[in-house]
Amino acid sequence: MRRSLGLAAYLALARRGGQAGAPPDRPRPGGRVVWAHAVDMARARALAGLARQLAQHRPDISMVMTMPADGAGADAEGRALRGPAIRQALPPDTIPAAEVFLNHWRPDLCLWSGGDLRPALLICAAREGVPLCLVDAEEALLERSRWPWLRDLPRAVLAEFTEIHARDEAAARQARRMGADPARVHVTGVLQEEALALPYREDDHETLARLMRTRPVWLAAMVQPDEIETVLGAHREASRAAHRCVLIVVPDDPEQSAGIAERIAAQGWRYITWSEGALPDETTQVILADTSGEMGLWYRLAPICFMGSSLVSGHHGRDPDEPAAHGSAILYGPNVARYLHRYSRYAEAGAARIVRDTDTLAVAVQALLPPDRAATMAHAAWEVASRGAEVTDQVVEMVLDTLDRRAAAET
């Protein structure tokens, strides 16, 4: 441990004024425990995916995931994270709270994501012999870890990390400026939840692909009732440019399908309802996909996907990783607060395009009807999604290697 007056002062305050807080409400699982901290919900989803992969590699590895206790990491709708991680609030940054947390969980490794470092918790973990790894370090979050009145404190904390994975060169420079050992800082990319391909029935896909093999197809997924007029208006414009164009409409809630069907019929569209067992023919203009659990089929059929629940406020958007993982170009509305960071990544890569109304949606769909244009966007989307898998694989390898070395040292 490097000597640091700033660190000594901080820890003295953290011991004298600190409360232990509430003890953990879950028992420690057997086997190895990885303590992973997510500073926000995006990283929580990525770490939950990491927990799934670790469990597949080593069933004896468990993850305890902490998130900010002030609610900053809460999901917009309280949606449960997918994965086996045990969720816990991050304890206060005090010596008593750190001791309670560490004595209970006895972690074998700490993965701290983003930045926004908590000195008392991290230093206490290091003193207990817990290897510290900083992943997905971000410049802005590292900047939060500055204490102007304790200038040497960031250097003392970063010195305890055995590895620092930065999402970009700006974050790597920031870590080095704050005193991190340059040999331990690596630019690895953005840690994000892996985009997984959804299941589908191959016979349904083969049948529909054969029936529509020469026709332009686009998908409006997770559509709200108050978006259907915009979607149908755009389809009308697209059909003027390509009269054999087919639109697949997937309601966000299958219970709303009857109302959406009425509006499709009222406009005079020739349509089929998938749940009724009908198949499209040469005259079909709209397919109402009103069943649950078949998005893998619709994403695979449509090279262009408009992600609904995004044109009007209050629905927060839907996950763009899904169409990206299936080879679709992505269109979306302006109200995607829940997934803004993901849409931004795809947009910056030329894989997604924002639309705002009937006219802009129609123009975007028409521009992508030529197969080569949709394929270019879809390939860019796939590259963004696959990069996340590569970064996750690197972290998994680092975790397994660190745990193996720790086990070897204990024998």
Image: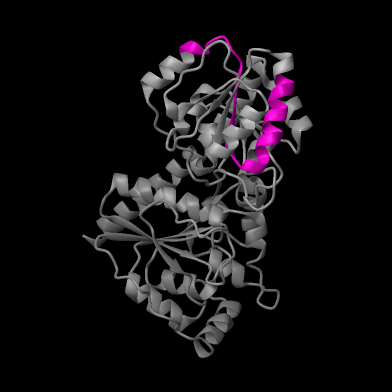
Residue 152 higher or lower than 219, as above or below: below
Give coordinates of residue 387: x percent, y percent.
53, 36
Q: Quadrant of residue 176?
A: bottom right
Q: Which of the pair 245/115 is nearer the observer?
A: 245
Which residue is at the front of the view, 358 or 304? 358
The quadrant of the image that shows the C terminus is bottom left
As drawn, 25 above or below 189 = below
**Residue 104 location, x and y as percent?**
33, 74
Extreme residue in the right direction: 359
What residue is shown at x 50% (from left), y 80% (from top)?
94
Highlighted range, magenta: 210-238
Q: Residue at x 37, y 68 (%)?
A: 129
Count up the numbered dots: 0
Q: Position of residue 374 (x, y in %)?
A: 64, 21
Q: Position of residue 80 (x, y in %)?
A: 45, 56
- Residue 57 sits above or below residue 297 on the image: below
Q: Nearer the viewer, residue 253 or 357?
A: 253
Left or right: where 65 falls relative to 140: left
